[in-house]
Image (tube, helix red, strand yellow):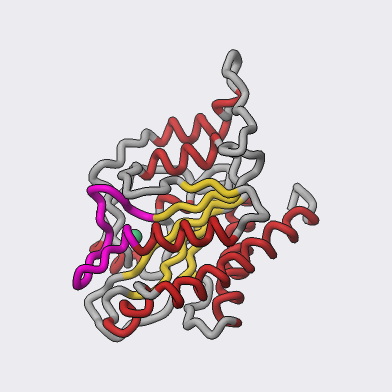
Amino acid sequence: MCKVNTSKVSLLAAVIWGAWAVPSWAMPGAAPVPQTPERPSMPVIIDPGHGGTDLGAVVKGLREKDIALAVALKLKARLKGLPVILTRDRDLYVTLDRRIVDSVDWGGAAFISIHLNEVKSKKMSGAVVYSYGPERRRGRRRKRRPSVPPMPAPPRVEAMESEFLARSIVKALREAGIRVEPATKSDYYVLKSPSSPSVLVELGFLSNPEEAVKLADSVYQNRLVESLAKAIEQYASERALRPEDL
Ligand SMILES: [Zn+2]
């Protein structure tokens, strides 16, 4: 699993819960969020995992934070027809709190967190796409991952939309011939945005030497980006047609 550095996480669940109940832009006296090119209405938010002092997985000099950022920048460039915001566009440490709060403040139409996997085995390969839900292998996961601050589950509609988006991404990756697990559930922190359908994509396993070479390769990154972009575009177009109360 990707190593989520939670040592600097400081979010109070109440902050997020409050943000959901009363969005900051809707608070009395709060200035409305300006609709600028940097802050468009209903943007797709791309979240390159880790950054700065949080390297993520590091295997033989390949750093998760670098590849996640490279793919995120490519994805933003590819999605030029949609409003896109990056939670970081350079090598910068951003707390998990900040990423979620931004997704709320920006009113994200979708939140896609980009990570890479690392496990002890060198054989595991392929992408894994998560949306919010109960974890099957909770016991194993807990050993690898420090606990995160309590945070409410996302609203039902967001969870359903998140699963829909996760399945779209899995389908697009599979159609491109990229190995991918069936859409998977997790309670990762960044999957709990109270207002944006959210997925976490593990692009592949840095711990697999062959796959690590591919993940660092710009051509393979472009294949991943093309699949992600197609799925996001499809999701965006279909969501626009979907009744709001689904
Ligand atoms: Zn990670």
Q: Nearer the viewer, residue 32 or 165?
A: 32
Q: 210 left or right of 178? A: left
Q: Position of residue 36 (x, y in %)?
A: 62, 33
Question: In the figure, residue 127 lies in which quadrant?
Answer: bottom left
Ligand 1 appears in which quadrant?
Answer: bottom left
Q: Position of residue 167 (x, y in %)?
A: 60, 70
Q: 157 left or right of 148? A: right
Which residue is pictured at 25% across the width and 56% down the height?
A: 55
Q: 205 left or right of 71? A: left
Q: Is residue 86 above or below residue 233?
A: above
Quarter of the N terminus within the rendering:
bottom left
Residue reaching furthest to the top: 29
Q: Nearer the viewer, residue 19 or 72?
A: 72
Question: In the figure, residue 37 lies in which quadrant?
Answer: top right
Q: Position of residue 130 (x, y in %)?
A: 48, 64
Which residue is pictured at 44% across the width and 51% down the height?
A: 190
In magenta, the rendered stretch is 49-66
Q: Is residue 11 above or below residue 160?
A: above
Question: In the figure, residue 212 lies in which quadrant?
Answer: bottom left
Q: Is residue 233 above or below residue 189?
A: below
Q: Position of residue 216 (x, y in %)?
A: 35, 72
Q: Nearer the viewer, residue 114 or 245?
A: 114
Q: Nearer the viewer, residue 227 or 28?
A: 227
